[in-house]
Image (tube, rainbow, N blue to C red):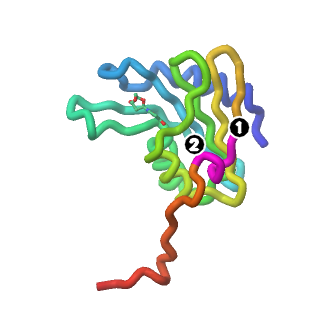
């Protein structure tokens, strides 16, 4: 496992890169592949609000782009006080790529660390077996 405080420091460094002029809430995320490599993302809002992208979605896109599709761990930090946990849509996006027991690690500005598995955050999550999907 990579050093959590080093990842927390990197997420703090990235928070100013978030594009969050509408909500004012900056979020940074890192996803750790099964190979131990880390991929980062920040939230990227848009004047057309629904087009905004969450930090976790950005980080997952970066990981998949680099050929990483099994996630061991996801880290989330924000500009809000306290711990921030992924929104419902991001829980589903994490679930898609989560390896068994994939952990979500929430990091607060004052050094608090929360840990939950993706199965705890998204019980009975939706999965499709591509081999069983009927094709038209
Ligand atoms: N946000 C994330 O980046 N990740 C989450 O899991 C929850 C929300 C962003 C979306 C929006 O830019 C801002 O936080 C406020 O909702």
Q: Quadrant of the C terminus?
A: bottom left
Q: Secondary structure at mark 2?
A: strand
Question: Going by the image, does 125 lie left or right of 70?
Answer: left
**Residue indicated by mark 1:** 115
Residue 20 within the segment the image draws in magenta = no
User: What crowding class fits label 1: few (fewer than 14 Cα within 10 Å), some (14-19), or many (20 or more)?
Assistant: some
Q: Residue 106 in the image: x percent, y percent?
A: 64, 32
Q: Residue at x 71, y 49 (%)?
A: 36
The residue nearer to you, when weighing 111 against 127, is 127
Relative to residue 90, is residue 64 depicted above or below? below
Label 1 C-beta lies within 8 Å of the nearest ligand 1 atom: no
Counting from the top left corner in percent of width and height, residue 125 is at 54, 59
Q: Is residue 119 magenta?
A: yes
Label 2 belongs to which residue? Answer: 39
Secondary structure of the residue carrying tag 1 is strand
Instruction: Determine whether, in the image, residue 38 is placed left or right of residue 24.
Output: right
User: What is the span of residues highlighted in magenta in the rendered image?
Assistant: 116-121
Ligand 1, image quadrant it occupies: top left
Q: Quadrant of the N terminus?
A: top right
**Left or right: 45 as drawn, with respect to 90:** left
Q: Position of residue 3 (x, y in %)?
A: 77, 33
The residue sitting at 42% across, 25% down in the picture is 18
What is the spatial separation of the Cα atoms under label 1 and label 2, in whole angstroms?
Answer: 19 Å
Foreground mark, 1 or 2, reads 1
């Amino acid at each position: 496992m990579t050093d959590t405080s080093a990842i927390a420091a990197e997420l703090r460094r990235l928070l100013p890169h978030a594009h969050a002029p509408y909500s004012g809430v900056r979020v940074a995320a890192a996803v750790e592949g099964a190979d131990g490599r880390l991929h980062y993302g920040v939230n990227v809002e848009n004047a057309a609000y629904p087009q905004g992208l969450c930090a976790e979605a950005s980080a997952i896109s970066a990981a998949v782009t680099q050929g990483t599709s099994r996630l061991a761990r996801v880290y989330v930090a924000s500009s809000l006080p306290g711990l921030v946990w992924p929104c419902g849509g991001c829980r589903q996006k994490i679930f898609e790529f989560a390896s068994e027991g994939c952990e979500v690690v929430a990091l607060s500005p004052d050094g608090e660390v929360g840990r939950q598995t993706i199965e705890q955050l998204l019980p009975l999550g939706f999965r499709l077996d591509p081999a069983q999907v009927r094709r038209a």
